[in-house]
Amino acid sequence: MDHIAKQIRDGIKARLEAPLSAEGVSTYSGRITRFRDAELDAVNIIPPESAVTDASRQQPPRLDREFDIAVAILISGRQHETLDRADEIAVHVERLMCLSPEWSLPVRKLQFIGDDLSRAEGADGELLTKTLRYVATAAHPAGAPDQPMISAQPVR
C-alpha cells in the first residue's frame, strides 16, 4: 500500500478530476515540472508536508500527523481575466474539498485555512497561481505510514 501522503494526494486528485475536466481544467498530482501555457488551465495537488502532532504511547503505538495540503490553480491569459477564472475554479475546488461519507480519504479532518496569489509573465500574457491551503489530520500505526487508521468522516 502507498504512503499515507500519496493516498491523500491521489484521493484529492480522484475527487477533483472529473468535475474539473468538465470545466476544461486538467488535474495533476504532485507535478514538479513547469507547466507550459498550452497545458493551462490546470490544478496541481502539491505533495503534502506533515508533522507528527502526537506520538501515542498506546499499544500498538500510533502516530497522529497533521498534513499541510496545497491545491494550486494555474491560469494563463489576459491579466483582467485570469483572476476571475481562478476564482471560478476555486469555487468548484472548495465545494469538492469538503469531507463526505462517499469520499474515502484517509483523514479525520480536512479544513480550509486560506489562499494566496502569485503572478508572473507568461507567453500568452499573465500566468496566475491561486493556491488553496488546507490542513488535514490523520493517524497510522508507528512505523506503518501506509496503513491509515481512520477513514474520512464528515466534519461536524
Image (tube, helix red, strand yellow):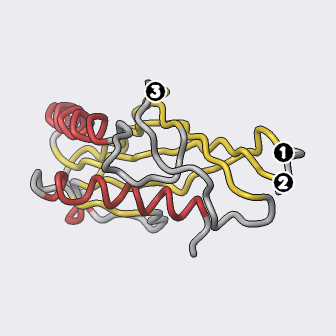
Closer mark to the observer between disc 3 and disc 1: 1
Residue type of the residue flagged with mark 3:
Gly
Residue type of the residue flagged with mark 1:
Ala
Q: Position of residue 113 (x, y in %)?
A: 49, 27
Q: Residue at x 74, y 58 (%)?
A: 141
Closer mark to the observer between disc 2 and disc 3: 2
For disc 2, the marked residue is 61
Q: Given the current orientation, which residue lies at the most extreme bottom position?
A: 1
Q: Position of residue 100 (x, y in %)?
A: 34, 41
Dots 1, 2 in contact, CB < 8 A: yes
Residue type of the residue flagged with mark 2:
Pro
Image quarter where the N terminus lies is bottom right
Q: Residues within 10 Å of mark 2 (few under 14, many from 20)?
A: few
- Figure check: 115 above or below 99: above
For disc 1, the marked residue is 55
Task: Determine whether, in the image, residue 132 is placed left or right of residue 50.
Answer: left
**Count of numbered circles in the view:** 3
Q: Nearer the viewer, residue 38 or 27?
A: 27
Instruction: Label 3: state its secondary structure.
Output: strand
